[in-house]
Image (cartoon, rainbow, N blue to C red):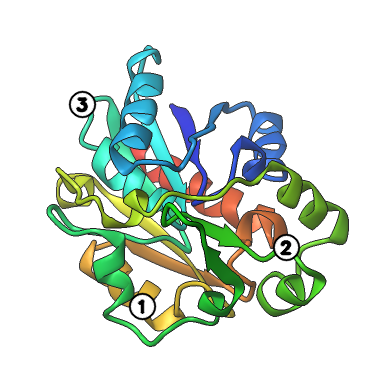
Amino acid sequence: MHIVLVHGSGGSANSWSAVEPLLRAEGHAVTAVDNPSQSLREDVAAVTSVIDAIDGPVLLVGHSYGGAVITDAGTHPRVRGLVYIAAWVPDEGENVTGLVGRYPEAEVGRWFTRGADGSWIPDDTAAAREALAWDVPLEVWERKVHDRRPSADAIFTERLSGAAWRTRPAWYLIARDDKHIHPEGQQDMAARAGATIRSVSTSHSVSHAAPQAVVDIIGEALASLTD
């Protein structure tokens, strides 16, 4: 089964730089998508295009905003399952903004500014790292800062046209110390999706703070889907 990794807002394919080598070392076929984070519809289309090019079944893995992307793109007939890593899990017709409003304001809101066009611009200072990603190695943080880009508001406000978790099995890895998405919100969304739930004591940057935990839940999903 081909694993397709989808990063969160403002991220890049390098968001999976600690996870992808571990998966390849286990012999898995892996593609890390590089979405521009300027439109939910465009990001869904980009992932759909990747799935179209794969000859065989697909497991989608999404982090943060990437959860919204895989929820919509996951309705593709080749997709067998969904793995959410500290991710947003909207339903059909919902958007990320609506989900954000259901839970207490997260600390991450203090560390963003808005561009003139409404884009979300992250704070890349040492203080932001200490508050939000304290368990990410400094060299990894600096590489993330180099790779990331502002995210358009449309990725949060555009509504999903489908919800793959309604017809496909899902797994969810909760980040218990997350300052981006409240852990209770993660629990709530995972339960609504009927996901198999696991957890890890990390910041929101799970793929860099605990890459093996990400690989383990992907392996659990693969084992279930190939039984």
For the C terminus, give its image quadrant. top left
Nearest the eye: 46 or 216 = 46
Is 33 on the left or on the right of 192, as rendered?
right
Q: Which one is earlier in the sequence, the residue at label 2 or at label 3?
A: 3
Residue located 78% across and 57% down the image: 141
Q: Amino acid at mark 2?
A: Asp
Q: Which one is earlier in the sequence, the residue at label 2 or at label 1?
A: 2
Please give the count of numbered marks on the rendered protein: 3
For the N terminus, give its image quadrant. top left
- The answer to whether any part of residue 227 appears in the image is no
Instruction: Answer whether labels 2 and 1 touch (C-beta < 8 Å).
Output: no
Mark 3, residue position: 77
Q: Nearer the viewer, mark 2 or mark 3?
A: 2
Mark 2, residue position: 124
Instruction: Answer whether labels 2 and 3 touch (C-beta < 8 Å).
Output: no
Q: Tell me the distance, in whole angstroms, between the alpha carbons under discs 2 and 1.
A: 25 Å
Please, what secondary structure does the residue beneath circle 2 have? loop
Which of the numbered marks, if any, corresponds to residue 185?
Answer: 1
Q: Nearer the viewer, mark 2 or mark 1?
A: 2
Please, what secondary structure does the residue beneath circle 1 have? helix
Q: Nearer the viewer, mark 1 or mark 3?
A: 1
Q: Which one is earlier in the sequence, the residue at label 1 or at label 3?
A: 3
How would you rate the neighbour count of disc 1 (Cα within 10 Å): few for under 14, some for 14-19, many for 20 or more? many
Residue 186, how many percent across, how many down? Answer: 39, 72
Q: Tell me the distance, in whole angstroms, between the alpha carbons under discs 1 and 3.
A: 29 Å
Q: Amino acid at mark 3?
A: Pro
